[in-house]
Image (spheres, helix red, strand yellow):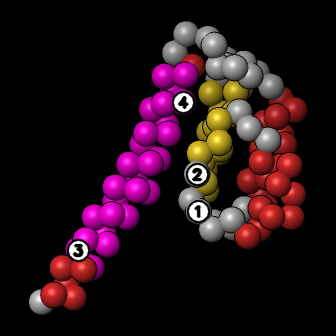
Amino acid sequence: MVSRGGRPDLASDALEYVQAATLLIVDGEDREVIELNRQAYARLFCEKRLEIIPGATHLFEEPGALEAVARLATAWFRHHLVDARQADSETNQGDMR
């Protein structure tokens, strides 16, 4: 799961039940949202990462900000989806041997 500029803190008590690998991407200019994401991050017990985009504001309109988000999200999904699919494929091939 990837959250860009979101408010995962609003999920409250459900955060401790999240099992999906979670990437939180936050704009660097919103100190309140950064703190709320840090609090939510502390309540997640899954694989997780918090990334702050320096100089970005809430809508990530600054030059290069959305590109930075896209690079982070792409790398996250490649690692967690493509690698997982490859691992499943290798496991299934091992079952056929």
Point 83% across, 29% down: residue: 31
Of helix, strand and loop, which one carries label 1?
A: loop
Q: How crowded is mark 2: few (under 14 residues within 10 Å), some or many (20 or more)?
A: some
Q: How crowded is mark 3: few (under 14 residues within 10 Å), some or many (20 or more)?
A: few
Query: In the figure, 72 relative to 65: above or below?
Result: below
Query: Pointer 2 and pointer 1: residues touching (CB < 8 Å)?
Result: yes
Asked if the residue at tag 3 contacts the one at tag 1, i.e. Cβ–Cβ closer than 8 Å, the answer is no
Give the mark, 4 or 2, whose residue is nearer the N terminus.
2
Which of the two labelled residues, at mark 4 and mark 3, occupies the earlier sequence position? Answer: 4
The answer to whether residue 68 is above or below residue 74 is: above
Callout 2: helix, strand or loop? loop
Q: Position of residue 9 (x, y in %)?
A: 83, 49
- Amino acid type assigned to the residue bearing label 2 in the image: Met
Determine the residue positioned at 40% across, 56% down: 81
- Let me know if residue 84 appears in the view: yes
Residue 38 visible, this angle: no
Q: Which mark is residue 90?
A: 3
Q: Provide residue 70's location: percent of width, then percent of height.
A: 48, 30
Question: In terms of sequence position, does the residue under pointer 2 or pointer 3 come before the other?
Answer: 2
Magenta segment main secondary structure: helix
- Which residues are the magenta region? 66-91
* Residue named by callout 4: 69
Residue 44 relative to residue 14: left or right: left
Mark 2 → mark 3, Cα distance in angstroms: 24 Å
Q: Is mark 4 on a helix, strand or loop?
A: helix
